[in-house]
Amino acid sequence: MNRRQGWTAVLLSLLAGCMQTAFTPDPPTGQKITLRLNPERGKIYSYKYTTQAATLTARSGPEDEARQAVSRHIDMQVTGADARGGVTVRVTYTRVQIKVSSPTSLIESDSAVANREPRTFADALCRALVGPTFTVRFADNGSVTGAGGVEELRKSIVANVRDARPSLLSLYSDLGMRETWQAREMVLPGRPVDNGDTWTHRRELTDAYPVILEHTWTLLRHDGDTATCCVKTTVRPNPRARPGRSRDGSILRRSVSGTQSGTAVVDRKTGMVRQMRITKQIVGDITPDEEGKKGKGLRIEQRGSITFTLIGVRTGALPGPGSAPGGAPGPPPRKP
């Protein structure tokens, strides 16, 4: 069995297990529940967010498959709410780990490695992302409505990453960060639901991810203080998306399609995600476009997974004038 077959077999077995068990709703209880985002102001929710992917290009053979794993430890402090139930959180990356491997190379970077001078692009990016803060805004159904305050983060990238490209900085603009968070949002139903009830959500992205996401959520079960949902997502190309840019600044036309599916466990009281696991299968075509003349395209196949896990919750001092990045430290995280 080659590398591609082995990686694919693992992901398909995980997906098959979800389809056979986790995606089957329990019988209705006759008691509908209401799920809405309602976290306590001042609370800091610590998450570990990990993406793993195996990517194969059309010019590669099975043995040339590249694998990437990125883990971010994230503190999200609830700083406010508006009259319509919207929630604002202050986000800080506290640790970033990147691992990229191929049959001929291996790159591993970790921002937690002390006193290490950056030797690679990944080293520099890990260091740049840790510490600066920005804000993300949510509606009361958990959908992401905006992001801002990224100036500190962008300055850190420019200071640490040599020759930071516009394509990289665009990911860390207000629009880029908003779409990054929208691509992984957990959307609550906005109405009372029972086991087996479904709701849908459509998200159109134009910049960081040039796709249209059509989600169908189902409540699988609710008991005690949690609710478990599953999601099936269709990924389609967005004809109105902005073209991308390569590292040398040339225009890239992108067309991405595929599927995603997985489960999420939500805290019934706060509406915050305790754990979310998603598998994805994506196919993309990237075509260079120079002065209106399209060049030869490149097809990319990607299979991967996304996990978003709550590590702990603590109370911290709310940021104010002169606050240090990340806010005042609180007691150690407690298990949710």
Image (cartoon, rainbow, N blue to C red):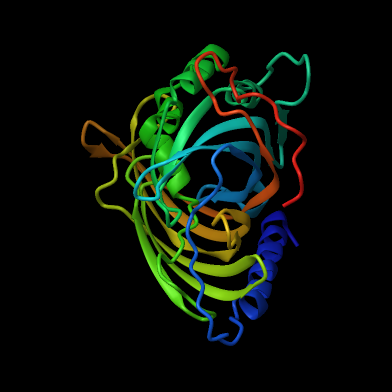
In x, y percent, where is residue 100? 67, 38
Quarter of the image where the N terminus is located: bottom right
Is 162 left, or right, of 119 in this rendering?
left
Up/down of 209 relative to 17, above or below: above
Q: Residue furthest left?
A: 292
Residue found at x 71% / y 29%? 109
Q: Is residue 67 visible?
A: no
Residue found at x 76% / y 16%? 116
Is 161 left, or right, of 213 in this rendering?
right
Q: Is residue 195 visible?
A: yes
In x, y percent, where is residue 62? 64, 54
Query: Image quadrant of residue 228?
Result: bottom right
How many numbered marks does the figure carry? 0
In x, y percent, where is residue 98? 67, 35
* Residue sitting nearer the eye, 310 or 5: 310
* Residue sitting nearer the eye, 265 or 256: 265
Query: Image quadrant of residue 225?
Result: bottom right
Is 320 left, or right, of 228 in this rendering?
left
In x, y percent, where is residue 165? 44, 22
* Residue sitting nearer the eye, 65 or 25: 25
